[in-house]
Each structure stands twice: as structure tokens, then as C-alpha cells.
Amino acid sequence: MSTQSRVVGAGLLFVFIFLSGFWLSSTGKPYNVAASTLHKLLGVGAAVLLVVTMVRTNQATRLGGLTTIAGVVTGLFFLSLIATGGLLMIDRQMPVVVARLHHVAPYLTVLSSAAALFLL
């Protein structure tokens, strides 16, 4: 699989992550199991695809410092999404800041992912 097809695949995964997230939030608590599972699997798939792309590119040609930083920042955003998403799945009421972070972080993740992939 070429880097270009991985970039297209990551872009499509992000589109489906957003769509499933909007679908999930429209169902309300308790969250729909099918929507929740799909949303989580798409997120994990996107993260794995980006890591594989970065690692394979690094094996072919050494990544520069800026590309590495963009990859680490993207990874941190993915971790924040996993943490806040997990907290939102709990039946108890979470502070509003958790939901706000989970609503803002996807856009930051897409931007940092795009920057990391552009720098490849």
C-alpha cells in the first residue's frame, strides 16, 4: 500500500469517524452499542493506519524533527480522544469540560494528522 493510498484511507476514516460521532451523539445516553462500537473501531483504525504510515516512512527515509513532533502531537490528540470518549461512555454525569474536549480535540487531531502526513 503506497503512502498516497494511506493518506486517502486516513482521510476517509476521519470522515467516517466524524459521521459516526454525530450519529452517536444524536442517539443520546445510554449510547447505541452499534454506533459506539463503530465509532471506536474507526478511531483505532485511523490511529493504527497513521502509526503504520509514519513507521514505514521512517524506515524508508528518516523522518525530520518537525515531522516527528507532528506525529507525537497527533498521538497525544488521539490519546486525549480515547480518554475523553471513555469518560463520556460512563453512565455517570461527567464535567462539561470532558465533553467540550471531546468535541474540540477531533478537529485538532485532523489538523495535526494532516500536517504530519503533509510533512511526510
Image (spheres, rainbow, N blue to C red):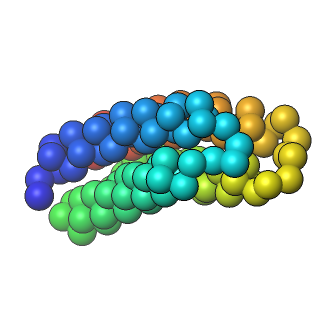
Seen from the viewer's position, the closer of residues 90 and 60 is: 90
In this view, the residue in front, 25 or 50, is 25
Which quadrant of the figure has residue 47?
Answer: bottom left
Q: Residue at x 60, y 36 (%)?
A: 27
Does 118 sit above or below residue 57?
above
Image coords of residue 56 (percent x, y) = 24, 65
Instruction: Give x and y (percent) for residue 21.
Output: 52, 38
The answer to whether any part of residue 23 appears in the image is: yes
Instruction: In the rendered view, tell whether residue 23 sits above or below residue 42.
Output: above
> Which residue is pictured at 74% across the width and 38% down the height?
99
Residue furthest toward the left?
1
Q: Quadrant of the N terminus?
A: bottom left
Question: Is the residue 15 above or below the residue 98 in the image?
Answer: above
User: Residue drawn 84% across and 35% down?
Assistant: 96
Residue closer to the observer: 106 or 31: 31
Residue 63 x/y as whole percent:
33, 56
Image location (x, y in percent) of residue 90? 76, 57
Res. 108 in view: no
Q: Relative to 72, is 28 on the left or the right?
A: right
Q: Quadrant of residue 53?
A: bottom left
Identity of the residue furthest to the bottom in this view: 59
Disc count in the image?
Answer: 0
Name the residue at 21% across, 49% down.
6
Q: Is residue 6 left or right of residue 13?
A: left
Task: Judge from the rendering whether residue 32 lies leftward or rightward of residue 56; answer left or right.
Answer: right
